[in-house]
Image: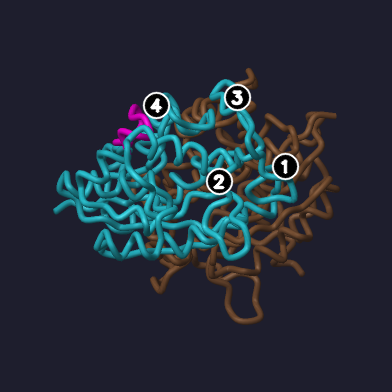
Chain colours: A brown, B cyan
Amino acid sequence: MPAAVVLLSGGLDSYTAAAAVKQGGFDLYALTVRYGQRHVEELVAARRVAAALGVVRHLEIDVELSRMGGSALTDDIAVPKDQPIDPAVIPVTYVPARNTVFLSLALGWAEVVGATDLVIGVNALDYSGYPDCRPEFIRAFETLAALATKAGVEGAAFTVHTPLIALSKAEIIRLGLSLGLDYGLTHSCYDPPPGGRACGHCDSCRLRAIGFADAGVIDPILAS
Amino acid sequence: MPAAVVLLSGGLDSYTAAAAVKQGGFDLYALTVRYGQRHVEELVAARRVAAALGVVRHLEIDVELSRMGGSALTDDIAVPKDQPIDPAVIPVTYVPARNTVFLSLALGWAEVVGATDLVIGVNALDYSGYPDCRPEFIRAFETLAALATKAGVEGAAFTVHTPLIALSKAEIIRLGLSLGLDYGLTHSCYDPPPGGRACGHCDSCRLRAIGFADAGVIDPILAS
């Protein structure tokens, strides 16, 4: 089976995107980036998810985005709680150029393992307005990838798979459940309380809660 | 003065590119990436060069590209010595997606410091055929940058300055000397011998030697 490099955060979306692409006939190489995120719990979740997916290899790499600051996820800026989620307003949880950095790293590893398929669980419907989750960004990255690489010069075309990009959060959850996924393995909260798994008030918790509610399913991390 | 984020390796090219852009009226923010390169001497050189340039800030960040392997610069692969330098053949010193990763990091930091100008010392004439040194790659990155970022969504256009891209190595050296640069601060060798600064046989040493010879100047790192 061909290989695909998937960006795996430990959250619900990347788990579902990876599973959908695996179902489509790919061996998965999972890449998790430790970028100084305050919610390090997601790194532990990424290991659980990678094991559940049966990936060929799970690579965790350190990239010190936190040295740059500029985001509530990496810097000493409060994570917004109970604020309106309006995709037209990019919140302070935006990490500058994060998905560009992540896809670049995935591209590099893809070249090393001989893959031309990348997977990212971005979603441009129930999301926080991050610019690097939109289809036009993904298409521009594919164009760049062909020009940036030895593989591209030799004629390869890179595909960035975004199976969730046009789905609602409820549709993502239904897709995952149809694939037999255990969302109890995942972590979404940006700012988990000590000893807890979810604050329930950040954008990520609330998008997740709305998704499970709309799907008519109890979130297993709340049930446990 | 407007700010520009410059990728500073400690080599001759990035020093010259930075100086040219500073001359053009920018305050410089220098970004050096420790990616597991075997020639760590260049990191020490980057500090010397950043000081000489009078940068506003010099940020060194760790990105574990060496965990991916796949290059003679980061992996247990011999650096080619005294091989023909043919830009049509990409050598094993190519680091998969390196400049894509580097420009992505520069883009992230640019957003944080409020800059829309990036600088990279790529050269597509006297070079090793790396795909991510070509003008078409740079243009594709600029397109991506506008789509990838909050600043882009808000209307900013990013410019990637490549003042060296069409110069010969001798022309680069002449430009730098006209700007008063001290190339004795720089490091180019991919595989320096213990205690030495240059092996004299890798592509990087040889391109540098040819450049100084063509410019009719003695390389100060050989004179010292």
Question: What numbered label is drawn on residue A18?
Answer: 1
Which span is picked out in magenta? B162-172
Subunit of label 3 = A
Residue at mark 2: B200
Query: Residue A52: x, y in percent?
Result: 83, 53
Could one spot residue B107 in this view of the protein?
A: no
Quadrant in which the N terminus of chain A appears: top right
Using residue B116 as the reference point, say whether residue B35 is left or right of it: right
Asked if residue B166 lies in the magenta stretch, the reply is yes
Image marks 4 and 1: residues in contact by CB distance under 8 Å: no
Residue A167 position, x and y percent, is 59, 36
Residue B114 against residue A115 in the figure, above or below: below
Q: Which residue is mark 4?
A: B135
Q: Mark 3, residues whose alpha carbon is within 10 Å: few (<14), some, or many (≥20)?
A: some
Q: Are marks 4 and 3 in contact (CB under 8 Å)?
A: no
Q: Earlier in the sequence, mark 4 or mark 2?
A: 4
Q: In 3D space, how far apart are the residues under numbered discs 2 and 3 (Cα atoms)?
A: 31 Å
Q: Are marks 4 and 3 on the same chain?
A: no
* Mark nearer the viewer, 4 or 1: 4
Specify the amino acid type for callout 1.
Ala
Determine if marks 1 and 3 fall on one subunit. Answer: yes
Residue type at mark 4 is Pro
State yes or no: discs 1 and 2 in contact (Cβ < 8 Å): no
Alpha carbon separation for disc pair 4 and 1: 34 Å
What residue is shown with label 3?
A152
